[in-house]
Image (cartoon, rainbow, N blue to C red):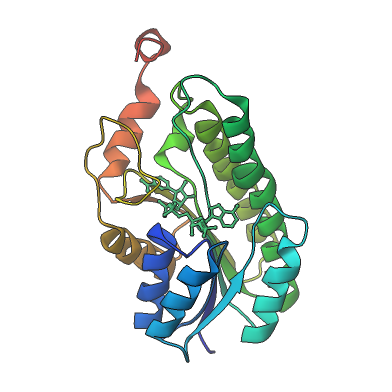
């Protein structure tokens, strides 16, 4: 079977690094994002292996674009959702919260819905999403971001349960990165910041192993364990 993947949100950051990692491993890759000039630049690296489609996930015609890309490529067997937004938002500016919800919740759900029906019709496939370590607890710095990532992880668990019951060879991977050095990584107290190349390598390995949940980089599993265990008495002061 030919290895064909679509990455939603690959003009920059982890999505772009994943596109390169997949091409290196013999995949034909379809990449998306709003910045068409960046898509064209990445395509130049391997024109015969990279297809592009430029659109905004939050616009009503987004799924038409995804479908058109999948049709151009023939059957795809891997769909990775890497598009996401997050703002440090101590002022609780609603426009920022809403932008986060529109992309990370509404558009995300639409993409997953499309992807899962596509794979069920086809009889096989692998759906991957980049949530975050932020999915594990609420956060005053970016309440909508943490909540939207919790939504994504919870949604993926539901989809994982659905595909398990279907008994079809359909897999899901919920990728939970800690800090990865991209435009998205913000905040004064960052630590254990991984390069996007290292993150992409580890994500690709976990896709190959069909892991359901993975922390990137691996040692963020320790932070996850600590974070989940902090009692509210302390957490509320952090
Ligand atoms: N970097 C980290 O430390 C970190 C940590 C935890 C989780 N994550 C998650 O990892 C994912 C990738 O983030 P990143 O760090 O690689 O950030 P990034 O470099 O900002 O990449 C985000 C990607 O999403 C696309 N995108 C944003 N808004 C879009 C929209 N409305 N429509 C279509 N595409 C859109 C961007 O393309 P255009 O702007 O061209 O549209 C870009 O390709 C996100 O879901 C993020 O929450 C990142």
Q: Is residue 25 visible?
A: no
The picture quadrant where one finds residue 171 is bottom right
Relative to 121, 28 lies left or right: left
Q: Quadrant of the C terminus?
A: top left
Q: Residue 166: x, y in percent?
A: 70, 63
Among all residues in the image, which is located at the extreme bottom? 48
Front-most of 237 and 44? Answer: 44
Rendered location of residue 67, percent (x, y)? 72, 73
Please count the marks in the image: 0
Rendered-image quadrant of the N terminus: bottom right
Depth check: give the residue in front, 230 or 197. 197
Note whether 62 is above or below 24 in the view shown: above
Q: Residue furthest left?
A: 192
Instruction: Report the side of 111 relative to 145 (left or right).
Output: right
Instruction: Give above or below for 156 relative to 202.
Output: above
The residue lying toward the viewer, choosing from 88 and 180, is 88
Residue sitting farthest toward the front = 37
User: For the point 35% across and 38% down, which residue is it?
Assistant: 186
Residue 19: x and y, percent? 42, 72
Residue 79 visible to an observer of this rendering = yes
Residue at screen point 57% across, 24% down: 93
201 versus 133 height, above or below: below
Identify which residue is drawn at 41% across, 11% down: 236
Question: Which residue is located at x 70 percent, y 82 percent?
Answer: 71
- Picture layout, residue 233 above or below residue 34: above
């Amino acid at each position: 079977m030919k290895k064909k993947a679509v990455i939603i949100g690959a003009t920059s950051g982890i999505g772009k690094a994943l596109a390169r990692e997949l091409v290196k491993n013999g995949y034909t890759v379809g990449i998306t994002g709003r910045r068409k000039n960046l898509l064209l630049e990445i395509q130049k690296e391997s024109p015969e292996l990279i297809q592009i489609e430029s659109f905004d996930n939050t616009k009503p015609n987004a799924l038409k674009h995804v479908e058109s890309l999948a049709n151009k490529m023939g059957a795809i067997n891997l769909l990775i959702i890497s598009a996401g937004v997050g703002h440090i938002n101590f002022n609780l500016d609603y426009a920022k919260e809403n932008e986060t919800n529109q992309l990370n919740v509404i558009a995300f759900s639409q993409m997953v819905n499309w992807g899962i029906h596509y794979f069920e019709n086809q009889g096989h496939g692998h759906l991957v999403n980049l949530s975050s370590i932020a999915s594990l607890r609420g956060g005053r710095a970016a309440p909508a971001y943490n909540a939207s990532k919790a939504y994504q992880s919870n949604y993926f668990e539901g989809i994982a349960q659905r595909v398990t019951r279907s008994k079809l060879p359909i897999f899901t991977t919920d990728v939970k990165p800690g800090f990865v050095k991209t435009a998205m990584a913000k905040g004064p107290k960052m630590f254990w910041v991984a390069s996007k190349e290292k993150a992409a390598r580890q994500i690709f390995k976990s896709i190959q192993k069909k892991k359901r949940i993975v922390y990137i980089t691996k040692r963020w599993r320790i932070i996850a364990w600590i974070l989940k265990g902090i009692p509210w008495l302390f957490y509320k002061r952090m």
